[in-house]
């Protein structure tokens, strides 16, 4: 991620940020994304849609 | 002088009925404590002016025979629960002067019963936090040790009950926001089954996660409030109809509720030694009382918090889009800065939201954006489903699942502010229940050497609150 990415997100979310705020967010995002990224390693063993629990 | 420390809903009700004292007398006692302690603890953001008038109305109900269990009982309510004609700011500057235009379901029900609503309590901004440190109105302090935090996001409600500034309180949970402060403040906190209590009039954070949850000093008080509020509400599209509020597990066949599953692998590390020791001792006590303690594996639940920190920000980015400087709330009116509508949005939101709110809105925007939606959001939704299924599956073998409530006792003011993830980890044991929608209870389980409260937590199947309450009352006898 870089500053441009933060700026794009801020634009989408309609939130004005100062330069310092953008830098701080970039730093925070680094840590947070590193944490939630572990979701990528979860093996789901998906095959077909399974609705057995809802029948 | 009324003994506030040992008061319960039932004791107060008996005293009201017998005429030993009136609701007005009780409320005056709480107001005295508030006057003495609230400045330091900052539990209440506002104490309502009409509190004694509410008490008088409650007393009338006792006189004319229309009183019920909650009549005259003093409640503190979290700042994100709408009370018509009163300010609800969700701990944010962006709603500083927002006056609720309608009653939330829970407020309407409490007022109908004649409960006394003392005031609104401090919370992390938009419920985003585990300590009240993100509140736009200052932190709340833990009554057990005022250099420490009461937990969050419902920290103000917890502090109010723990400091005898209210008999009971309502908070809300999206991920542990009642159980964790209950743990830090030595209280009982009960998160209902998702869909049990109406979300109508609750300022939304994560629609698929939010639930109103009561705080009490004992299990029976939490039970009374839960039973009273757990009703179908057609105004909440996620409210579960009465006929669907059934237990669909082995408990139906009368398994007796005596088998506790413990997913020890989930807390092999990262847990404070005092918390771990206390948890082990608590399980021993249950064993001695005739419960079976069984080792269980919940492999997907290991990823609950990661999944939560993808799903919740996504929902937050949607739910907080309404705070745009147009509909209501803080708006940048200064003409010099405003050239067009977009400027109003950008500046109102930029200035009205605090740091954590902006962080989570942007995180949500990121995980929902093109190119990342599949890797993050969709994956998290699938993991969530796996967590839910493995918990339901576990309840085919056990009646309850036990873990520590929080990985540490109450921490000091100022801690964990530099590293957002360190703060998020406070809710590592809370997340599975919110993701799966199952009910969960936090129970006071002892004290550390420094006299800080410790807590253990149980989960039960959907609509299995009775099992939680039964185990809780048992624990009150054996701990």
Image (spheres, helix red, strand yellow):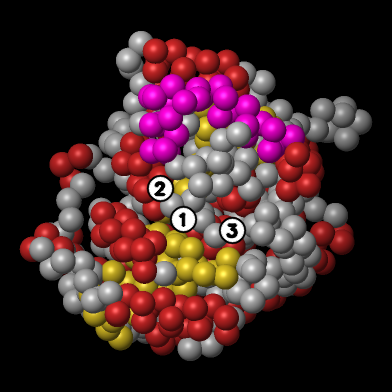
Q: Are marks 3 and 2 on the same chain?
A: yes
Disc 1, SS: strand
Q: Residue at x 39, y 18 (%)?
A: B62
Q: On the image, which quarter does residue B91 sit in?
A: top right
Name the foreground residue: B389 vs B48.
B48
Label 1 crowd (10 A; few <14 / some 14-19 / many >=20): many
Location of mark 2 (residue) = B222
Location of the C terminus of chain B (image quadrant)? bottom left
Q: Are marks 3 and 1 on the same chain?
A: yes
Spatial distance from mark 3 to mark 1, Cα to Cα? 9 Å
Label 3 crowd (10 A; few <14 / some 14-19 / many >=20): many
Location of mark 1 (residue) = B188
Disc 2, SS: helix
Mark linked to residue B185: 3
Subunit that carries the residue with mark 2 = B
Q: Is residue B151 magenta?
A: no
Position above or below: B242 against B151? above
Subunit that carries the residue with mark 1 = B
Residue bounds of the magenta highlight = B9-35
Spatial distance from mark 3 to mark 2, Cα to Cα? 15 Å
Q: Residue at x 18, y 46 (%)?
A: B244
- Whether residue B117 is visible here, answered yes or no, is no
Magenta span main SS: helix
In-image side of B29 versus A18 (left or right): left
Q: Position of residue B76 (x, y in %)?
A: 56, 37
Q: Is residue B16 magenta?
A: yes
Q: Position of residue B158 (x, y in %)?
A: 58, 50
Tell me, yes or no, whether the two marked residues, 3 and 2, touch with CB atoms within 8 Å: no
């Amino acid at each position: 991620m870089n500053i441009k990415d933060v700026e794009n997100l801020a634009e989408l979310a309609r939130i004005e940020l100062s330069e310092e705020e953008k830098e701080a967010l970039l730093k925070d995002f680094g840590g947070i994304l590193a944490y939630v990224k572990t979701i990528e390693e979860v093996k789901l063993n998906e095959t077909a849609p399974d609705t057995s629990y809802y029948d | 002088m009324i003994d506030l420390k040992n008061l319960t809903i039932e004791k107060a009700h008996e005293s009201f009925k017998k005429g030993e004292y009136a609701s007005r007398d009780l409320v005056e006692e709480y107001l005295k404590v508030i006057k003495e302690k609230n400045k330091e603890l900052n539990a209440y953001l506002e104490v309502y002016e009409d509190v004694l008038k509410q008490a008088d109305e409650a007393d009338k109900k006792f006189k004319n025979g229309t009183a019920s269990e909650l009549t005259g009982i003093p409640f503190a309510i979290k700042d994100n629960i709408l009370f018509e004609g009163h300010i609800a700011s969700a701990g944010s500057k962006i709603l500083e002067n927002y006056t609720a235009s309608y009653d939330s379901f829970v407020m309407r029900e409490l007022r109908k019963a004649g409960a006394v609503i003392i005031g609104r309590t401090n919370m992390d901004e938009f419920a985003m936090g585990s300590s009240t440190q993100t509140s736009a109105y200052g932190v709340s302090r833990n009554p057990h040790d005022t250099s420490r935090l009461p937990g969050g996001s419902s920290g103000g409600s917890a502090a109010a009950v723990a400091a005898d500034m209210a008999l009971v309180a309502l908070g809300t949970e999206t991920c542990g926001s009642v159980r964790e402060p209950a743990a830090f403040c030595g209280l009982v906190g009960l998160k209902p089954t998702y869909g049990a209590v109406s979300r109508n009039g609750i300022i939304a954070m994560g629609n698929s996660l939010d639930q109103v949850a009561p705080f009490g000093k004992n299990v029976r008080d939490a039970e009374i409030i839960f039973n009273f509020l757990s009703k179908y509400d057609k105004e909440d599209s996620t409210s579960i109809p009465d006929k669907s509020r059934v237990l669909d597990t082995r408990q139906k066949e009368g398994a007796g509720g005596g088998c506790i599953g413990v997913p020890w692998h989930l807390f092999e590390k990262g847990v404070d030694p005092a918390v771990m020791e206390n948890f082990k001792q608590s399980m021993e006590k249950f064993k001695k009382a005739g419960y079976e303690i069984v080792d269980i594996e919940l492999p997907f639940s290991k990823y609950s918090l990661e999944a939560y920190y993808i799903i919740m920000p996504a929902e937050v980015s949607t739910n907080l889009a309404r705070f745009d400087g147009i509909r209501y709330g803080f708006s940048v009116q200064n003409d010099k800065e405003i050239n067009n509508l977009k400027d109003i949005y950008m500046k109102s939101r930029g200035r009205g939201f605090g740091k954590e709110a902006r962080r989570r809105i942007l995180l949500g925007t990121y995980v929902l954006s093109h190119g990342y939606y599949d890797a993050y959001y969709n994956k998290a939704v699938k993991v969530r489903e796996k967590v839910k299924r493995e918990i339901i599956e576990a309840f085919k073998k056990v009646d309850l699942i036990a873990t520590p409530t929080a990985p540490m006792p109450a921490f000091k003011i100022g801690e964990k502010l530099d590293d957002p993830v360190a703060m998020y980890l406070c809710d590592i044991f809370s997340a599975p229940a919110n993701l799966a929608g199952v009910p969960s209870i936090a129970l006071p389980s002892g004290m550390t050497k420094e006299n800080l409260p410790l807590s253990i937590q149980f989960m039960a199947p959907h609509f299995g609150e009775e099992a939680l309450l039964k185990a809780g009352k048992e624990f009150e006898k054996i701990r």
